[in-house]
């Protein structure tokens, strides 16, 4: 364990400061390797396309026979599957790239692609599981919203709780699946949850990156009013999307670093 990890062995404030140190380290790594921003940009563009698909499904749901309409269910799982797969693969590629650089690989992209290729079917299985979980949550939320006695509030509480629990259980799932090839899918999720339990206060240190995102949002709003018209709207959208892209890349890098410290020594084949 390095100095940053030793700093976090004290109180909660110390661990939070360690997370803040990892935040700075992750943002610095991102500036030094702009290719990762390109990967995050592709991820965000595909995510927007997936979101539009979900919106279209929402309109279809209103016209169809309900949540149990076969076409709706197939399309819902399909959209979530596509979103989960490319998100998982992109995060895996960024994670592999970070570890390749830190391990001194002369060809980090090749090393990262090799890792993703070796674990492709495991990552694909994880994507299918994530799609199934998200689809079930979406269906249950829709069912709850249709109950007059329950109302939207209970549905919203359930949705936030279920999504929060899934995120907490899988926050380190991609690094674990990518780098610990002997673990099963169930074992990887269990270990991911265990790592978060050990590092939750350090993980909260990533909140110190939010001023960067807020800065992009403020810039977008400023451009909207300063330029005005269609060009102002376009400039605002570009600024805000840029902030999302930067944060997506940072998030994957941060989790890779934190996993490497909490999980202990790791070994990456430089070939």
Image (tube, grey):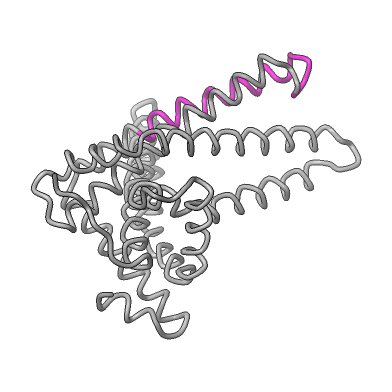
Q: Quadrant of the C terminus?
A: top left
Name the foreground residue: 47 vs 186.
186
**Side of 13 where 23 appears, left or right:** left
Q: Quadrant of the N terminus?
A: bottom left
Task: Report which quarter residue 40 is drawn in.
Answer: top left
Task: Report which quarter residue 142 is drawn in.
Answer: top right
Q: What residue is rendered at 79% in x and 47% in y?
A: 154
Determine whether 93 is above or below 29 in the image: above
- Magenta stretch mostly in which secondary structure? helix
Was residue 53 drawn as part of the magenta stretch in this picture?
yes
Task: Report which quarter residue 34 is drawn in.
Answer: top left
Q: How many marks?
A: 0
Residue at the extreme right of the image, as rendered: 149
Was residue 182 drawn as part of the magenta stretch in this picture?
no
Q: What residue is rendered at 66% in x and 14% in y?
A: 71
Name the foreground residue: 47 vs 263.
263
Q: Which residues, given as a range, are shown in magenta?
A: 43-67
Query: Picture coordinates of residue 47 (x, y %)?
Result: 44, 32
**Side of 175 where 152 appears, left or right:** right
């Amino acid at each position: 364990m390095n100095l940053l990890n030793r700093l976090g062995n004290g109180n909660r404030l110390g661990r939070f400061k360690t997370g803040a140190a990892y935040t700075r380290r992750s943002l610095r790594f991102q500036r030094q390797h702009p290719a990762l921003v390109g990967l995050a940009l592709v991820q965000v563009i595909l995510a927007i396309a997936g979101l539009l698909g979900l919106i279209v499904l929402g309109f279809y749901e209103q016209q169809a026979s309900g949540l149990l309409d076969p076409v709706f269910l197939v399309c819902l799982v399909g959209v979530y599957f596509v979103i989960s797969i490319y998100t998982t693969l992109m995060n895996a590629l960024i994670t592999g790239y970070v570890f390749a650089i830190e391990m001194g690989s002369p060809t980090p992209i090749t090393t990262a692609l090799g890792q993703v290729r070796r674990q492709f079917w495991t990552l694909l299985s994880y994507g299918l599981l994530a799609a199934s979980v998200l689809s079930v949550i979406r269906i249950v939320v829709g069912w709850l919203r249709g109950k007059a006695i329950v109302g939207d509030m209970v549905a919203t509480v359930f949705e936030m709780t279920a999504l929060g629990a899934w995120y907490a259980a899988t926050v380190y799932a991609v690094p674990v699946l990518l780098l610990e090839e002997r673990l099963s899918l169930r074992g990887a999720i269990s270990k991911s949850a265990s790592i978060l339990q050990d590092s939750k206060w350090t993980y909260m240190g990533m909140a110190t990156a939010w001023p960067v995102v807020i800065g992009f949002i403020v810039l977008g709003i400023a451009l909207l009013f300063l330029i005005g018209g269609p060009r102002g709207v376009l400039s605002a959208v570009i600024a805000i999307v840029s902030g999302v892209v930067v944060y997506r890349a940072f998030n994957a890098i941060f989790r890779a670093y934190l996993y490497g410290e909490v999980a202990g020594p790791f070994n990456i084949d430089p070939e």
